[in-house]
Amino acid sequence: MSIIETEIWKPNPDCPGTVFFDSQRTARDIFNDLETHLKADGRMPDEYFLFDSFGYWSDGALFPKDGVIVCETNYGTSEGVWLYISVSYEKEVYEHRRDNGVLEWHKRKVFEPFATGKTLGDTVDDLDRMFLAASSVMAAFYGMKVQVQERYAKIESGAIQPIYPQT
């Protein structure tokens, strides 16, 4: 499966064989591609997978040019295992500066929620499945040289053994 692109590039009519930057893709379109990727990879969280539950990416918002996908996987406070996907980028914000306390516009790095996945199970196997989903997300955006796979297997004696030889 190919990498999920966040930018739109078009052929350059003035110089065949080259392209030029046209625009950013919408966050919703990128989420739809990610959802399709997780389904195809068999890594879709079994309870739900939601886009922008906090409302940061509404009304056709474009994915930020310098945006970086960040995944966090952890047990929930009440039940299940959660996969939080955020976008980190520099944003112009109106707030008090830390150095002088003055309220003004300035750029700073922000982490804005992008997608949330959840499984109801709360075993170590469920945690492993959600970490594999996070690995699949990262591979979808930053390169999938090989399919994301489990690296350990339980053998008949109950012990855990590496699937691939370690170097």
Image: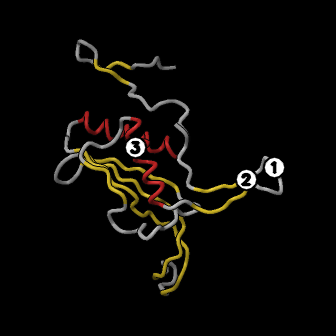
Q: Position of residue 55 (x, y in %)?
A: 36, 68
Q: Nearer the viewer, mark 1 or mark 3?
A: 1
Tell which of 106 and 118 is nearer to you: 118
Q: Give the Cα distance between marks 2 and 1.
A: 7 Å
Q: Is residue 35 left or right of residue 67?
A: left
**Circles 1 and 3: CB atoms closer than 8 Å:** no
Q: Is residue 13 left or right of residue 129?
A: right
Of pointers 3 and 2, the one earlier in the residue sequence: 2
Q: Give the Cα distance between marks 3 and 2.
A: 33 Å
Q: How many marks?
A: 3
- Amino acid type, mark 3: Ala
Of pointers 1 and 3, the one earlier in the residue sequence: 1
Q: Position of residue 91 (x, y in %)?
A: 52, 71
Give the residue at x 52% y 30%: 146
Of pointers 2 and 1, the one earlier in the residue sequence: 2
- Amino acid type, mark 1: Pro
- Amino acid type, mark 2: Pro
Q: Is residue 17 left or right of residue 141?
A: right
**Circles 3 and 2: CB atoms closer than 8 Å:** no
Q: Which residue is tagged 2? A: 11
Q: Position of residue 77 (x, y in %)?
A: 20, 54
Mark 3 is surrounded, within 10 Å at the Cα level, by few (under 14), some (14 to 19) or many (20 or more) other residues, namely many
Q: Which residue is tagged 1? A: 16
Q: Nearer the viewer, mark 3 or mark 2?
A: 2
**Circles 2 and 1: CB atoms closer than 8 Å:** yes
Give the residue at x 43% y 66%: 57
Q: Give the Cα distance between marks 1 and 3.
A: 38 Å
Q: Which residue is tagged 3? A: 134
Q: Pick out the residue farthest to the left.
A: 78
